[in-house]
Amino acid sequence: MSLSPLTTEKTLYFRQILDWWFTCSIIGVLNGVGADLEKYMTLVSERQKLAASNIANADTPGYKTQDIDFQRELSSAMSGAAPDVVEVPGLRVRNDGNNVNIDRESRLLAENALRFNVASNLLRSQLKTIRTAIDGGTAAA
């Protein structure tokens, strides 16, 4: 039994629609995760800027260390709120009123680099998944 040209044409058309729908569904799901990763990476970037600013002001008299409560701000960022920058309590204040601790800030820089690398690897993996879906499961390495 052979299919008529019209039936074959319809079959190809519906196959294209199904492929498109499947790809859009995957992208839609991954966009949600990708948007969360974007918010996470933005928060990590904000914290990186604060740590760099703290280090740059390590010798500025009266400067107070600024940071964000990462876990709380991550929850807030998922709902679209901007991070709340606060002065860090409990740090030793020098005679000039400055309380920047270079060791603490260096640790935060390293921690943020690790967080950013993990998030960028997850994002890269998602992009690879999308590419595989678009290529029909035969994406090149």
Image (cartoon, rainbow, N blue to C red):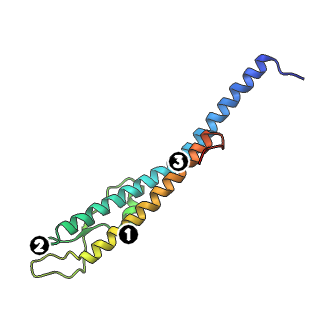
Residue at mark 1: 111
Q: Earlier in the sequence, mark 3 or mark 2?
A: 2
Residue 9: x and y in percent read 73, 21
Q: Quadrant of residue 93?
A: bottom left
Q: Residues within 10 Å of mark 3 (few under 14, many from 20)?
A: some
Q: Looking at the picture, which amino acid does disc 2 mark?
A: Gly
Q: Looking at the picture, which amino acid does disc 3 mark?
A: Leu
Which residue is rendered at x = 10% and y = 82% of the image?
95
Residue farthest to the right, as pictured? 1
In screen coordinates, is 62 left or right of 118?
Answer: left
Q: Earlier in the sequence, mark 1 or mark 2?
A: 2
* Circle on res. 38: none
In screen coordinates, is 116 left or right of 130?
Answer: left
Q: Nearer the viewer, mark 3 or mark 2?
A: 3
Which residue is rendered at x = 27% and y = 66% of the image?
51
Q: Is residue 23 above or below residue 120?
A: above
Determine whether the residue tagged by mark 1 lies in a helix, strand or loop.
helix
Distance, label 3 to label 2, CA atoms, is: 46 Å
Q: Earlier in the sequence, mark 1 or mark 3?
A: 1
* Circle on res. 127: 3
Q: Nearer the viewer, mark 1 or mark 2?
A: 1
Q: Quadrant of residue 43?
A: bottom left
Q: Is residue 16 above or below residue 107?
A: above
Which residue is rendered at x = 27% and y = 77% of the image?
103
Determine whether the residue tagged by mark 3 lies in a helix, strand or loop.
helix
In screen coordinates, is 85 left or right of 64?
Answer: right
Q: Quadrant of residue 55?
A: bottom left
In the depicted view, which residue is nearer to us: 18 or 45? 45
Residue at mark 2: 62
